[in-house]
């Protein structure tokens, strides 16, 4: 199997259902995806309130700026959350954004290769998803950003194999700083697994390039 | 290649040099490992101040309690930081602990599958290593613990492929709570990449099992 090219017209989008997705993932996906479809409002066609964000092997949100392409072409690097190809083994997720409400929702199914405490997801894997969702949200809201702070409270462990909701909202933007808060809950919202705040700082392209 | 058995007399220890380790990793490993060897002090043989902690595919620190074995045997789960078998592609690290000084040092080489911002390590991968090192340190100090809080300041990005030092120290222990602080620096200590505080809570085995 060859890797999909970043520069083909259709790079592979990992944020769509595959055979590893359980019932909860499929139902949640349908729930939000159905609200992404174009609707007719007073004869004028417009999108639904939610937009699904595609996910690739690389940080295309950066590549989209058209600056890193030469660096990316030379690199065999792969996005941390997409570095395992076996469906269902690690991070299965899809992110939806509601620009009007400044909210993001991620549906996340945690595979068996994310273990920390026996039978439960590693705190670092949870942090990774929180960074991914809040960082994506901050990019949608503020353009290029880098993570400056993550403050994460782990309230209840997440069993391997389970599906959870990760919801983020923009708290405020002050100059170069974007403040996002986030919580990870059971899919029915009744059990709080994790809550976090995140601070992102807008950066120039030259700052990122100097590494 | 068959997976090493958890129950063989010699499960594979990933915290030893392999062909992917660069010069800095090897030099740092030798530096700390040489201080782990038994020394003769006044005719009495005793260990050096540092002890290298082995690392396996599973959370053996939990399995060592002898409680989870049946659960672990049935599971194909693998420790998040050891879920990629290609040497050098993801997390390469070794942890050394100095019980007398209540310090831990981890030497960490970041592979190309840990990418977040182009060319740099994902904030979640850094959080994962901080959770791993401080959590291991807390377990050494206080026995069974779970992560309750991670507060991470990202100061300067870590380029993919580079080697960094992760140092942690125990700040205090109050009842069931163990407070650890941590910093990630360049190998010469001059550049601060990340700093963090972590709170761990001692848990009973039954709490962990109920997942």
Image (cartoon, coloured by chain):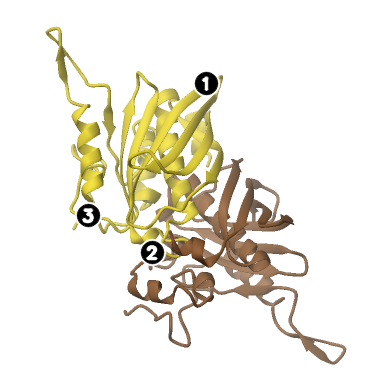
Chain colours: A brown, B yellow
Q: Earlier in the sequence, mark 3 or mark 1?
A: 3
Query: Gap between marks 3 and 1, in whole Å?
Result: 38 Å
Pointers 1 and 2 within a single chain: no
Kindly give the residue lying farthest to the left in the view shown. Answer: B43
Mark 1 packing: few (<14 Cα in 10 Å), some, or many (20+)? Answer: some
Rendered position, B187 above or below A86: above
Residue A13 in picture, x, y percent from top left: 50, 76
Q: Which residue is mark 1?
A: B173
Rendered position, A195 above or below A9: above
Name the side, left or right, on which A16 lies relative to A27: left
Q: Which residue is mark 2?
A: A84
Parent chain of label 1: B
Residue A29 in picture, x, y percent from top left: 62, 70
Q: Which mark is residue B20?
A: 3
Pointers 3 and 1 within a single chain: yes
Rendered position, A156 above or below B48: below
Name the side, left or right, on which B53 lies relative to A65: left
Residue B49 in picture, x, y percent from top left: 27, 22
Residue A174 in picture, x, y percent from top left: 72, 55
Kindly give the residue lying farthest to the bottom in the view shown. Answer: A43
Query: Gap between marks 1 and 2, in whole Å?
Result: 38 Å
């Amino acid at each position: 199997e060859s890797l999909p090219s970043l520069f083909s017209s259709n790079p592979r989008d990992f944020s769509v259902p595959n055979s590893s997705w359980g019932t909860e993932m499929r139902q949640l996906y349908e729930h939000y995806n159905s609200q992404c479809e174009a609707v007719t409002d007073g004869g004028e066609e417009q999108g639904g309130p939610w937009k699904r964000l595609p996910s690739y092997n690389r940080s295309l949100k950066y590549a989209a700026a058209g600056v890193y392409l030469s660096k990316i072409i030379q690199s065999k690097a792969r996005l941390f959350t997409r570095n395992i190809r076996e469906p269902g083994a690690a991070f299965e997720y899809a992110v939806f954004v509601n620009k009007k409400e400044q909210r993001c929702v991620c549906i996340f199914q945690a595979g068996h290769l994310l273990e920390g405490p026996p039978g439960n997801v590693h705190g670092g894997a949870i942090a990774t998803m929180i960074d991914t969702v809040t960082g994506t949200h901050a990019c949608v809201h503020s353009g290029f950003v880098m993570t400056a702070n993550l403050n994460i409270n782990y309230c209840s462990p997440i069993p391997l194999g389970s599906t959870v909701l990760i919801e983020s909202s923009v708290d405020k933007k002050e100059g170069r700083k974007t403040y996002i808060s986030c919580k990870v809950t059971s899919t029915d919202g009744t059990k709080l697994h994790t809550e976090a705040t995140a601070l992102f700082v807008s950066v120039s392209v030259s700052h990122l390039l100097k590494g």
